[in-house]
Amino acid sequence: MDRITISQRSANMRKIRGKDTSPERAVRRLIRALGFGYRLHGKELPGKPDLVLKGRKKVVFIHGCFWHQHPGCRIAHTPKSNLEYWVPKLEKTQMRDRRNLQELEAAGWQALTVWECEVKDISSLQVKFIKFLVPS
């Protein structure tokens, strides 16, 4: 098995995007197909939600399973090396996510988190969005 060098690992990490990821684009297509409009990356809201449906006072976060440590997901593993860097970094991300959700809720917003692994099952995701976006 070939070992990845530090420079190769750095090059791989630089390629990871924070916006316009393939899960985000898939979710956007689905929400548009359902007939809902949205704004992207709400800078004025805690956590800069990926999608903002202002009139409904709802936001959607599209989280990468590894970066946000999706509970019970195989993608959300803990790295085997450099634990003194990764463990605090991933824990801070989770704490920040919880704080952002609390602040949004306190301001009267409803939030939905979509995980990277959920995007593979579009029909299930569609049901999730309808339940979240359509008033009952």
Image: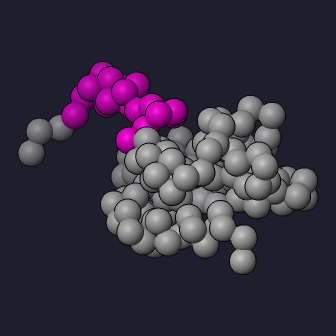
Q: Can residue 73 be seen in this view?
A: no
Q: Where is residue 34 in the image (x, y as percent from the top left)?
A: 51, 57
Placement of the N terminus among the 4 image quadrants: top left
In the rendered structure, the answer to whether residue 87 lies left or right of residue 45 reads left
Q: Position of residue 21 (x, y in %)?
A: 43, 38
Q: Residue at x 59, y 51 (%)?
A: 36
Q: Can residue 17 be seen in this view?
A: yes
Q: Which residue is drawn at 51% across and 48% down?
A: 32
65 in magenta: no
Q: Which residue lies furthest to the bottom in this view?
A: 136
Quadrant in which residue 129 is drawn: bottom right
Nearer to us in this view, 34 or 91: 34
Q: Position of residue 74 (x, y in %)?
A: 36, 65
- 70 up-or-down from 57: above or below: below
In the rendered structure, the answer to whether residue 93 lies left or right of residue 67 reads right
Q: Position of residue 8 (x, y in %)?
A: 26, 26
Which span of residues is magenta-colored?
4-23
Placement of the C terminus among the 4 image quadrants: bottom right
Q: Which residue lies furthest to the front in this view?
A: 35
Quadrant in which residue 123 is drawn: bottom left
16 in magenta: yes
In the rendered structure, the answer to whether residue 44 lies left or right of residue 27 reads right
